[in-house]
Image (tube, rainbow, N blue to C red):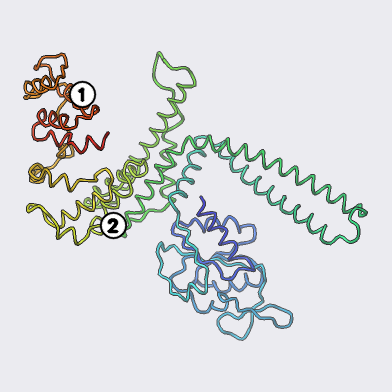
Amino acid sequence: DTTSVENGVMTTLASSPKGGRWPLLIDPQEQAVKWITKMEAKHGLRRIRLGDAGGMRVLEQALQNGTPVLVTDVGETIDPVLNPLLRKQYYTSGGRTLINLGGGDNGISYDPSFRIYFTTKASNPHYLPDMCLKTCIINFTVTMSGVEEQMLADVVGIEKSDLEESRQRLIESVAADKKKLKQYEDGILADLETATGNILDNDNLVESLKHAQSTAQLLSHRLKQADIQAAEITSARMAYKAVAARAAVMYCVMTDLALVDTMYQYSLDYFKKLFAQVVHAAGPTRALDDPEPEQPGPEREKAAFQAHLKALTDSLTLAVYQNVSRGLFHKDKTLFSFLITAQILRAQGQLSDPEWQFLVRSGSFTRPQDEDACPLPWLSGKCWALLCALSRMVPALKGLPEDVVRRSGVWQAWMGQTEYSNVMPLPGMAVCGDGDVPPQCSECHRLLSAWGLDLGVPPAQLTYGRIASAVWGLSRDGQFTQAAELAALAYGEEGRAWLPLEQVQRGL
């Protein structure tokens, strides 16, 4: 993802000879450690921990030989003996570049190709300003987009290994071609800059330029072909994006549990192993069990693949819940279930950010003046302020405080319930089936007749559905008062809750 690429660029620049400060990487998931280990393996990377026996000797040898060093598990401070190295206090003596470690008089030879990386597993370390001045602190904490990209690579690597291998080869070839193209372009400019006299008379220079130009054109053509191939591979990989997105959501929920109890710690490696087990257990895409298929071959295969993706997503969600729940206290299991549900709804766009923020931080959005202006004696000032804040933050609930005031008795009765259920309707929700007949069917029929509206049915067949159609017909004709009156008659006191005049006007 973009964040990882930017971190990699900053780390490379900081560890270069022209870098100002050595990099200190915040790396709780050890993403940076794996990347540096793979990148510097061919240069003889040495890995040490500060305080280990022989660590300083390894560091001194690396300084002299110019080999890279990876220092892991750094705390919030670094041993002052390394201050000359952190501040790059080199000096020249006898034609050699030296550095003193530990304040001794004997300088150690310094090779300009030497590089050192510091990493820490702490997710939120508190460094003093002095540490920020001596090192370049880079946060390698994995992001949701980074996890999603890794999970996408993993699932495609298992389900379509040839596709993922082609992608990896393409990335490497594109990087190599771009590097060669840059070298040829720089070489052309260097030849032109150092040429003397009339360059057209220099046959060697002309031939060199022609060769460089033809090679550069060939590389440019290969890069264009690679772009086309990359687009095709990306399109095929995106079919698994829903599975990768669910995996990223589940991992972020797992890491958030550390805020509930510091004992709940889960590594990215653990999650990736669990994810791989789920994908392997799911197996390849199976054909739909339909002895007489109505869909043609391609559509049937697409339906089977979509069913396979849904099974993968559901299996991953269940596996993560079961495995994590085994290590949770009983009191935290319900919270874990809620976090999973909420984050899935947020990822799907069914739960907006304002709604989520109000749920977790509702008290910070209230205003003192609203608490003092509560117009209802049965409602506390704090609840009234929360109602006002909710109507401001959530567009779908705009006007809720005014509705509570207008129908104070209905809302007071609703709040007086001793038991609540997720199916208990809020005031204002229609609870009558369209096929049911209201007790006031005769009065509604008489009212419609007085307005010159004949629905063609006797009062006994005047259902809620027909009344609703009549209400909307009246509102479309601009007869808002009649529409609200008919709704109030059909639905009793809740009629204006079901279809208040203001709602009709807003809807139209």
Query: As rendered, which of 125 and 181 lies closer to the eye?
Result: 181
Q: Amino acid at mark 1?
A: Ser
Q: Amino acid at mark 2?
A: Val
Q: Residue at x 24, y 44 (%)?
A: 397
**Residue 22 in the image: x percent, y percent?**
56, 69
Residue 86's label in the rendered image is none
Ranked by sequence position, the earlier of labels 2 and 1 is 2
Q: Nearer the viewer, mark 2 or mark 1?
A: 1
Query: As rendered, which of 49 and 239 lies closer to the eye?
Result: 239
Instruction: Name the image quarter holding residue 121.
Output: bottom left
Query: As rendered, which of 394 and 251 lies closer to the eye?
Result: 394
Left or right: where 136 falls relative to 63: left
Q: Which residue is mark 1?
A: 469
Q: Residue at x 52, y 71 (%)?
A: 135
Query: As rendered, which of 417 and 240 lies closer to the eye?
Result: 417
Residue farthest to the bottom, as pictured: 105
Q: State the SS at label 1.
A: helix
Q: Residue at x 16, y 34 (%)?
A: 498
Q: Residue at x 60, y 76 (%)?
A: 88
Q: Which residue is mark 2?
A: 260
